[in-house]
Image (tube, rainbow, N blue to C red):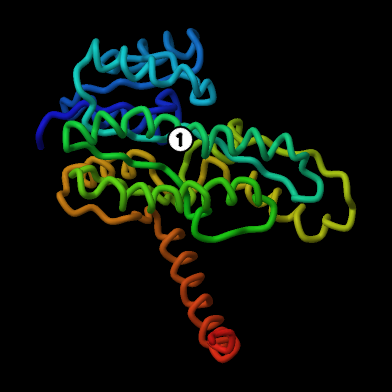
Amino acid sequence: MSRKTFFITGANSGFGLAIATAAAQMGHQVIGTVRSETARSALAAAVPAIHPVLCDVTAFDQIPDVVRDTEDKYGPVDVLINNAGYGHEGVIEESPLEEMRRQFDVNVFGAVAVAKAFIPRFRERRQGFIVNVTSMGGMITMPGIGYYCGSKFALQGISEVMRSEMAPFGVHVTTLCPGSFRTDWAGRSMIRTERSIADYDSLFDPIREARQAVSGKQLGDPEKLAAAVLILVETDNPPPQLLLGSDALKHVSARLKRLQEEIDAWTSVTVSTDG
């Protein structure tokens, strides 16, 4: 495995910390972004081999300077892991638009802003690997996480275009689509809109209770995800998206089957609009 330089956003917890730790242990140079001095100190103490850098992915105008300073100090980055993000849970009717805007600022605009800061550098060097962390929620939907799924669907689509645009320059782009893993996503990291409309109680309350009950007990192991990512970034022919977790495989496969059945059922109407 060749030694690479990783730039990982949201490196102080969850997938970001797992990938950063595994990469550092394999001898790679790792730059991990955090949002506060407290988090930077904590990350430096927990994993001394990681170089913590302050970067709020929603401070869009500051990101190019962070990337420039990082490469000036540590050399060219080979792998960008666009991991920073969080979950929002709430019925759409109950959830303020401001919560949707914040969700998209972090999960979509933040990820794209970081990628755009690296794209010209990767293009000019004719190499680089962008891993945008989406979710199985970027390929399927579930009641109560509409804003989250919307943000991940958006990043999924943008990433596919990014992959096509960067391929002629030798730059790889893959979306990472995890299922349920033992991270803080469904715990302290999730923003939850307060319930206010009783009509949704029977639909949504059991979903919220079940999600909270399994938090920290999910089947997915973040350390195994990190190992899979290290395999991914070494390949010369990476997939457009990589599902991770047996639940992601199950749910996405079922959705694709239903989609094909819907297409087949409505084919006559679909083609009736030609001419």
220 versus 49 height, above or below: below
Q: Is residue 1 left or right of residue 187?
A: left
The amino acid type found where label 1 is placed reads: Ala
**Residue drawn at (38%, 15%), measured in percent from left and top?**
65
State the quadrant of the N terminus. Answer: top left
Residue under pointer 1: 111
Tell me if mark 1 has few (under 14), some (14-19) or many (20+) residues whose alpha carbon lies within 10 angstroms of its own: many
Q: Is residue 104 left or right of residue 89?
A: left
**Residue drawn at (46%, 17%), measured in percent from left and top?**
62
262 versus 16 height, above or below: below
Name the residue nearer the viewer: 74 or 269: 269
Q: Is residue 17 left or right of residue 237?
A: right
**Residue 69's image quarter?**
top left
140 versus 182 height, above or below: below
Name the residue nearer the viewer: 245 or 138: 138
| Residue 52 horizontal/vertical position (percent) | 36, 15
Task: Give the residue furthest to the right.
Answer: 198
Task: Give the residue furthest to the left.
Answer: 2
| Residue 26 horizontal/vertical position (percent) | 17, 30
Q: Is residue 156 left or right of residue 151?
A: left
**Residue drawn at (89%, 53%), measured in percent from left and top?**
198
**Residue drawn at (22%, 15%), measured in percent from left and top?**
74
Name the residue nearer the viewer: 22 or 264: 264
| Residue 195 horizontal/vertical position (percent) | 82, 44
| Residue 119 horizontal/vertical position (percent) | 31, 34
